[in-house]
Image (cartoon, grey):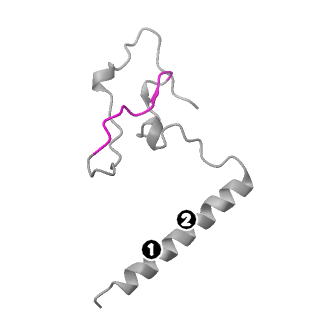
Amino acid sequence: MVKRRKLGVPVTPKPERPRCGAKTRAGGRCKAPAVWNRRNDEVRNGRCRMHGGLSTGPRTEEGLRRTLEALRAGRARWLAKRAANSKY
């Protein structure tokens, strides 16, 4: 069941809403506002529109399969690189 904001309840003011906070290439944090769900008066997923806040994820079984394959391959590369650089 979806929680909805009651009529007459004030909406969170924009200056009080959370920021994206994704790490930028310059090393700082993104200051753009996170995508806001006005119906429920809450943040959708904590990221701005440029860092995945509007993403719906894979919509088909094939898309989900490709996403998981890429995730596993990337993790395997990361583990191999980490093992190669390990001092132990």
Residue in the image at 62% along x and 67% along y: 69
Q: Do callouts 2 and 1 mark residues in contact (Cβ within 8 Å)?
A: no
Residue in the image at 28% along x and 50% along y: 26
Between the C-alphas of marks 2 and 1, the distance is: 11 Å
Q: Specify the segment rendered in magenta.
A: 29-39
Q: Quadrant of residue 36?
A: top left
Residue in the image at 42% along x and 40% along y: 47
On residue 71, which mark appears?
Answer: 2
Point out residue 10 in the picture as x, y percentages from the top left corner: 37, 13
Q: Earlier in the sequence, mark 2 or mark 1?
A: 2
Q: Is residue 32 magenta?
A: yes
Secondary structure at numbered mark 1: helix
Q: Quadrant of residue 17?
A: top left
Q: Is residue 64 left or right of residue 37?
A: right
Q: Quadrant of the N terminus?
A: top right
Residue that label 1 marks: 78
Q: Amino acid at mark 1?
A: Trp
Q: Amino acid at mark 2?
A: Leu
Query: Residue 33 versus residue 18: which sits nearer the camera?
Result: 33
Q: Is residue 5 magenta?
A: no
Depicted 80 relative to depicted 63: above or below: below
Depicted 84 relative to depicted 38: above or below: below
Point out residue 45 in the picture as x, y percentages from the top left corner: 45, 40
Point out residue 73 in the picture as x, y percentages from the top left corner: 56, 71
Query: Residue 36 versus residue 87: which sits nearer the camera?
Result: 87
Depicted 80 relative to depicted 67: above or below: below
